[in-house]
Image (cartoon, grey):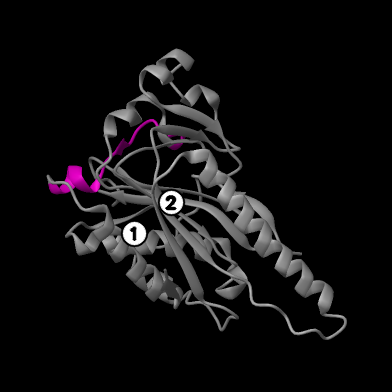
């Protein structure tokens, strides 16, 4: 039976080398075109609603295809989407999260120009804001590989390769989803640069990743990010000592995702 499940911030991590993902290359599929929408800075809730609409439309196609199997009807290809955006200051709490990991009350949220939402992805609390690249893939994994760990490791690998483009060695930490600097066991200052939390229904994904590019890291001081108390958060700008054009980062990330998923990204 096809799944409807959440993937939390805490997940078993695959080996950090690129070959591990290459071994998981997806098999032949129906449709590997991914429709990309660059939304700019948009409010969180309308973007969440848009994801829900796209997911529901894809699931409806899959349901019709299954119903048509008995009559021998040709299946309809399911679409794949990727929404790229920034958000105004917002904190989101996943299904497995703890409300006390938000360290601001309602008045303090307003004073910081931020909002707070409980949502249906996996994981604990995280922050989105200006200067952060947020990606929401609404992919039918039956078009690629119906394996949530393959999917998460592929997202991570795309970010790892992107950071390598800027001369930064990033990787995974065992037991923690996302992408980290100083990730090696025993490293003195592990720093998270990209958070992930997804939902999957009938092998169709939503939610996704948040990569700190030019992010104001002070906003992470008001939460316990992903429930992790002993590790820091960083950004591309913090590590490089300069701001980085967000469009440039988007372009590079799309190139790496296309290679890893063996997909065509179109706008």
Q: Residue at x 28, y 29 (%)?
A: 218
Q: Please, what secondary structure does the residue beneath circle 1 have?
A: helix
Q: Position of residue 140 (x, y in %)?
A: 60, 67
| Image quadrant occupied by the C terminus | bottom left
Front residue of this view, candidates 40 and 181: 40
Range shown magenta: 226-240
Q: Which residue is mark 2?
A: 209
Tally of numbered tags: 2
- Residue located farthest toward the right when viewing the structure as drawn: 71
- Give the residue at mark 1: 159
48 displayed left or right of 234: right
Between residue 16 and residue 209, name the one nearer to us.
209
Q: Residue at x 56, y 78 (%)?
A: 31
Q: Are marks 1 and 2 in contact (CB under 8 Å)?
A: yes
- Give the Cα distance between marks 1 and 2: 10 Å
Residue 47: % across, % down: 51, 46
């Amino acid at each position: 039976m096809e799944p409807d499940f959440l993937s939390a911030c805490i997940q078993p991590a695959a080996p950090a080398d690129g070959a591990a993902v290459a071994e998981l290359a997806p098999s032949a599929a129906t449709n590997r075109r991914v429709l990309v929408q660059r939304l700019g800075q948009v409010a969180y809730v309308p973007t969440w609603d848009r994801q829900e609409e796209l997911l529901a439309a894809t699931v409806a196609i899959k349901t019709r295809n299954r119903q048509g199997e008995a009559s021998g009807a040709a299946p309809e290809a399911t679409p794949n989407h990727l929404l790229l955006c920034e958000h105004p200051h917002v904190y989101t709490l996943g299904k497995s999260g703890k409300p006390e990991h938000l360290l601001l009350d309602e008045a303090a949220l307003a004073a910081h120009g931020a909002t707070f939402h409980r949502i249906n992805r996996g994981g604990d609390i995280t922050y989105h804001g200006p200067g952060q690249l947020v990606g929401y893939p609404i992919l039918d994994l039956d078009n690629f590989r119906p394996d949530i760990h393959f999917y998460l490791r592929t997202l991570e690998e795309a970010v790892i390769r992107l950071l390598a483009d800027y001369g930064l060695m990033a990787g995974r930490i065992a037991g923690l989803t996302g992408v980290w600097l100083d990730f090696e066991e025993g490293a003195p200052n592990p720093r998270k640069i990209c958070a992930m939390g997804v939902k999957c229904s009938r092998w169709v994904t939503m939610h996704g990743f948040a990569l700190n590019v030019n992010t104001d890291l002070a906003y992470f001081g008001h939460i316990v990010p992903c429930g992790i108390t002993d590790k820091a958060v960083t950004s591309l700008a913090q590590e490089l000592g300069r701001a980085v054009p967000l469009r440039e980062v988007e372009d590079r990330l799309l190139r790496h995702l296309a290679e890893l998923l063996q997909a065509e990204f179109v706008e």
